[in-house]
Image (tube, rainbow, N blue to C red):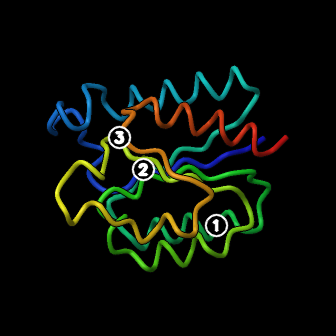
Amino acid sequence: MKVLIIHGPNLNLLEKRNNSIYGEKTLEEINNLIKDKAARLDMEVEIFQSNHEGQIVDKIQDILNKDYKGLIINPAAFTHYSIAIRDAIEILDIPVIEVHLSNIYKRESFRKESVIVPVCTGQISGLGYNGYLVAIDALKLLNK
């Protein structure tokens, strides 16, 4: 079972961001936890990070004709306004889970709306890096 993980803008600099919001792990540490969890569940993961909206859209479109069984995406700031990412996800015919390290509903008002989640299977918000691990479990269950 092959799954794509997409990390959006600024997640490559987690160690420089507010630990009380984003946690203390670096993106590399989170990616290693994701890979370990996936391996235990006999899943293959491809992990991609970009600060550029168009690259994220291209990556989503790239999986259309491939044998992916799910997408986990943390669109980061793009969550709140990227209709382009939303439209690319809407085309997919696989489960998609939106993940956020922080609880976006407990933050600034502009962060409380996701234009992405209406085209996703589900959303996990506020569990820190564990949100990715829960999302992997969910995709495994959704693909039984």
Q: Going 78% across and 41% down the picture, which residue do you hit?
A: 1
On screen, residue 49 versus residue 107, left or right, reads right
Residues at discs 1 and 3 in contact (Cβ within 8 Å)? no
The image quarter in which residue 22 lies: top left
Q: Earlier in the sequence, mark 1 or mark 3?
A: 1
Residue at image location 49% in from the left, 63% down from the top: 117
N-term mark: 2 or 1: 2
- Residue 41 is left or right of residue 25, and the answer is right
Q: 110 above or below 107?
A: below
What is the crowding at mark 1: few (fewer than 14 residues within 10 Å), some, or many (at least 20)? few
| Residue 91: x %, y % from top left | 66, 75
Does residue 91 sit above or below 32 in this rendering?
below
Asked whether, in this view, residue 26 is left or right of residue 131, the answer is left
User: What residue is pinned by disc 2?
Assistant: 7
How many angstroms separate mark 1 from mark 3 (CA)?
25 Å
Mark 2 residue crowding within 10 angstroms, few (<14) / some (14–19) / many (20+): many
Q: How many marks?
A: 3
Q: Secondary structure at mark 1?
A: helix
Q: Is residue 29 left or right of residue 5?
A: left
Q: In which quadrant is the C terminus drawn?
A: top right
SS type, badge 2? strand
Separation of marks 2 and 3 at Cα, in angstroms: 11 Å
Q: Earlier in the sequence, mark 2 or mark 3?
A: 2
Of labels 2 and 3, the one closer to you: 3
- Residue placed under numbered mark 1 in the picture: 62
